[in-house]
Image (cartoon, rainbow, N blue to C red):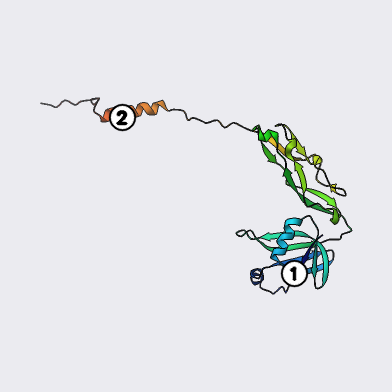
Amino acid sequence: MLNLNAKIRDIKEDLEVLRKGGNLPAVYYGMGKPSTSISIPMVEFKKVWNKAGESSTVKITTADGAVDALIHEVQVDPVSDQPIHVDFLVIDMNKKIQVGVPLEFTGVSEAVKGGLGTLVKVLHEIEIEALPKDLPHNLVVDISKLATVDSQILVSDIVLPAGVALITKDTEVVASVALQKEEKEEVAPVDLSAIEVEKKGKKDEEGGEAPAEVTEEKK
């Protein structure tokens, strides 16, 4: 299990000052535990987040003791793309929980490689149920099975670790190959009447035709 050392945080503390000091404001709650505001070193959290994602258990240790939790929600700055706040959900290690686990696509599809079609990823995570200790960080999907344009990978094709049960319907499509469509260049039809009018106008300007009517001057 991954570990994070944290400090109990005063809710009146200036969060910007906290972040500039290299710490990340966070909170944990759940399982009858009161909502507790904490701060954790930014560098340490990013290491744990990279390994745990939102489906692996993290042990948070403070001066008040330790709790087992999942990274429930991470708020990210839209400009810097850096975490600015984290919610941890406290869990019971002896009770099964349901979580969404991300899918990792590996391998090479011969249909895509050969230019027959394009890869379509329908699902990016699936719901599973397991004891916290059995939760996988991710699940691998081998796209080399997609050899033709009519082939698909279903949820039922994903190999689950021991102790993990599927919640998502096993008939749902995870990935497929879409037929490559040839792009045809559209040529706009030529307006012949416009060309004729343009030619006639040009001839008139050059003085090639006399006026249609001439009024004879009276003597």
Left or right: 218 in relation to 210: left
Q: What separation in Å lies between label 2 and label 1 (alpha carbons)?
A: 82 Å
**128 or 49: nearer the viewer:** 49
Left or right: 124 in relation to 184: right
Quarter of the image for residue 179 reads top right
In the image, what residue type sits under mark 1?
Ile
For the point 66% across and 35% down, which residue is it?
Answer: 113
Taking the view exactly as shown, the residue that stands out farthest to the right is 94
Q: Sort mark 1 into few (<14), some (14-19) or many (20+) by Cα contacts within 10 Å.
A: many
Vertically, is 124 above or below 18? above
For the point 39% across and 26% down, which residue is it?
Answer: 193
Q: Which structural element holds mark 1? A: strand
Vertically, is 41 above or below 50? below
Give the residue pinned by disc 1: 38
Q: Position of residue 57 (x, y in %)?
A: 81, 58
- Residue 192 seen from this side: yes
**Mark 2 near mark 1, Cβ–Cβ under 8 Å?**
no
Quarter of the image for residue 204 reads top left
Q: Which structural element holds mark 2? A: helix
Q: Nearer the viewer, mark 2 or mark 1?
A: 1
In the image, what residue type sits under mark 2?
Gly
Q: Sort mark 2 into few (<14), some (14-19) or many (20+) by Cα contacts within 10 Å.
A: few
For the point 87% across and 59% down, which residue is it?
Answer: 93
**142 or 186: nearer the viewer:** 142
Q: Position of residue 120 (x, y in %)?
A: 68, 39
Q: Position of residue 96 (x, y in %)?
A: 87, 55
Q: Quadrant of the C terminus?
A: top left
Q: Position of residue 126 (x, y in %)?
A: 78, 47
Q: Sequence order check: which comes first, mark 2 or mark 1?
A: 1
Q: Quadrant of the N terminus?
A: bottom right
Give the residue pinned by disc 2: 201
